[in-house]
Each structure stands twice: as C-alpha cells, then as structure tokens.
Amino acid sequence: MNRLLVAVCVAAFAVIIGQRILKLMEISLYSREIPLKHLPNCQLLKHIDYGSEDLSILRDGLAIISTGLNYPGLPQSEGPGKIYTLDLLDPRLTPVELQIKGDLDSDSFNPHGISIFTDETDKSVLLFVVNHPTQVIGDSQVDIFRFVEEENAIVHLKTIRHDLLHRYVKSLMAHNREVFCFCLTKYFVSPSFFLSFSVNDIVAVGPESFYATNDHSFPNELLHMLTVILGLPWCNVIYYSPQEVKVVRDGFLSANGINISPDKRYLYVSDILDHEIEVFERRRGEGLVYIKSVAVGSLCDNIEVDYDMGDLWLGCHPNGAKLKNTVDLEDPPGSEVIRIQNILSEKPTVTQVYADDGHVIMGSSVAAPYGGKLLIGTVYHKALCCDLK
C-alpha cells in the first residue's frame, strides 16, 4: 500500500512538473519565429563588441551606453564593463569611452541597467548604474556618478547597497515564501544561501532616490527557474531614498525594465515572462497603484520613453529559448523592437518597428529613438543605429 501511494505521488508530481515545463516553454516563446523587418541605413557601432545592455539619450542627442555586462550563463566580455557616449547628431556615429574617476574599483565594474537624472538645482547630470561587481547573481549595488561631458568622464559619487537590493531579509517575506524556503533549507542548505535578489534596471527620481526592479528571487539560477516553473511570482520593485527603502510592488515572475512617464506620474515595468508592460500610478509616499497591463507578445527587456511623445520603446527577445544559443550561428537569438503609443488610452497601439533573426544583431535589450534614428542595444552582442524613415 505504501509503495502504491508513493508511486501515485511520484506520478502526480511528474505530471505537474511536466505541465510546468511545457508552460516554461510557452513562456520562453520557444517556437516563435518572426519575419525580418529591417530599417534603412543600419550600421553597427565601432568599439562595442560585448553588449550594450542599456542606454539612455539626453535631450541634446547624446546617448549614454552601458557595455560589457558579464552575466552568469551568457557570453563574457574580455575585461570590465565600460560606459560610452554616442553623439547621434554626428554622422560619424563613433562611440567615445568615458573615463571613470573617483573611488570605485573600475576593474570589477559590471554595469547592467542605467538611468539619467538631471538635478534642476545645479543642472548637473547624474548617471545611476546597476552594478554587479562580483558577477554573482544577487550581488547588486547602485553606483551614482556625475557626468562631466567636457572631460569625457563620469565621477563616482556614491555606492548604495541595501538588503532589499542585495539580501532579502526573511522577516520581510510573504508567508508562502517562508514555507517554501523552510522546506528547502531544512533539508538542503542554509537560508542565507538563497535569500537574495538581483537588481536588473533602475529609474532615478531624485539625486539619491530611485525605483529598481529585482529580476531573480534566488541567486542560484536553478532555484530561480524552479520558481518560474512553479509559477511563483516572487520578484518585485523597490523604492530607495536616503530616508526610506521599501518594496512598493511585488507579484512579478521576473521584473525587468523600468521607466517613468515624462510627467513623472506613471511608472512602467516590464514583466518580461508574462510578455506584458505593467502601468502603475505613483502616489503619495512613493507607493504604486496598478492601472493596467499592455500585452506585447514578446520578451521585452528595457524600456525607453520618448521625451516629447511619451511613447514607450522596448528592446525585446522574440524567442527566449535561443538567447543563450551563441554556438549555433545558423540559428542565433533574434532581436525585436516594439513601440507602444498612447499607453494610457483605452486602446494603446503596439507596433513592431524592427525585427531580425540574429544574423545582423543578437539579443536586443533596449531601443531608443532620436532625430529620426533608432539606437538598438543588446545583452552581449553589438549596438546598431538605423534610420527610422
């Protein structure tokens, strides 16, 4: 009888896991193939060979680009990460490496998401960078720099580390997560091994304040994938200021790109594994109130917002199952750029602007327009600039 019961339980568990694996394949869009949709006059940028994971464009057309992200499981760069600028008004389109000054170990610099904030009190431009200095999932900090354009430099001002950006303290967990962790830690490892998040992206809302997304619920990739397979939405959005740090929204399978509307009223978050952009309204106390979700049909990474029109531009992965496929050059990971217009209206317009099968550019993670051009960045490949017209 006991053996029969065990056999039934094992069979039931196998069925459940099988169903969740099929769900994971569905989430990754493993069978999706997209027709090419290229833009005119595209050119790959010089000097950028190890990714351009995130970028942002100042109002004068100067783009700031983070490169060289070393992320577990993906191709690695040959050295530390770098920050470049690119003048989109200069027809030569030549990236310029910025010198990193100040008290920061540039040899371990590993930039991920970035955000630009202009301090209206003195018009200084601040660059916020998500940095993973040890290249371990869960080891995250935010570094703030002052951009000094005339010196082609960024000057390090401050490093921010916090439990909610690095170690997720057990006392702050939801009850269901405590039960799950108790079961695992009781029989396998100590809680300190797993209780960690990895910051992905950031949007600055003050000289030392920002919102940030956590895209992992565990520092171990297998454990994180287990939560995804089981459909456990344990990733979140954090608000940080010198006075207060808190979780302002949870319930994401993987919270990825984040940005803000031009009027600073609405926050946009890419729930990448749900193939949606979530819209939240900021309220007093920096709380977030859910407004709506917009389906995009792709695994969309970072979000850039047009200053003038308020449109969202998304760098997306059309087939997530191919993202780590860098060996089979016959079937590389593709790239897709999606634009959302009138996102706050009853019927937003979602448009595919660019699509490639990976033979031009692999693994697009961000895209931003300026002056009739479109700049596209990638997780670990190159960067591409095209004409929109």
Image (spheres, rainbow, N blue to C red):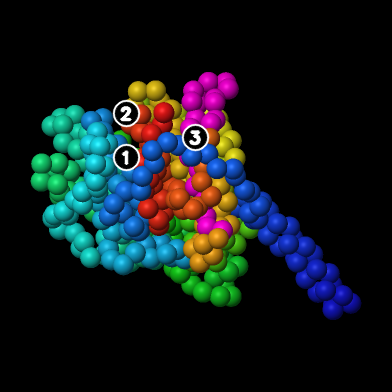
x%, y% of residue 245?
35, 45
| Tag 3 secondary structure | strand
Mark 1, Cα crowd under 10 Å, few <14 / some 14-19 / many 20+, is many
Distance (Cα) linking label 2 and label 3: 16 Å
Mark 2, Cα crowd under 10 Å, few <14 / some 14-19 / many 20+, is few
Instruction: Give the residue displayed 84% in from the left and 78% down from the top.
Output: 3
Looking at the image, tell me whether mark 2 or mark 3 is earlier in sequence order. 3
Residue 48, located in which quarter of the rendered image? Answer: bottom left
x%, y% of residue 63?
27, 40
Residue type at the position of mark 3 = Val
Figure check: 262 above or below 75: above
Task: Provide the residue designation for mark 1.
Answer: 56
Distance (Cα) linking label 2 and label 1: 14 Å
The label on residue 102 is none
The label on residue 353 is 3
* Tag 2 near tag 3, CB within 8 Å: no
Q: Who is closer to the viewer here, 184 or 357?
A: 357
Looking at the image, tell me whether mark 2 or mark 1 is earlier in sequence order. 1
Residue 259, located in which quarter of the rendered image? Answer: top left
Magenta stretch encompasses residue 201: no
Residue type at the position of mark 2 = Gly
Looking at the image, tell me whether mark 3 or mark 1 is earlier in sequence order. 1
x%, y% of residue 273?
57, 48
Task: Provide the residue designation for mark 2.
Answer: 371
Which residue is at the far left? 151
Q: Which residues are magenta?
A: 331-351
Count numbered badges in the picture. Answer: 3
Q: Is residue 384 visible?
A: yes
Quadrant in which the N terminus is drawn = bottom right
Q: Is residue 162 left or right of residue 318?
A: left
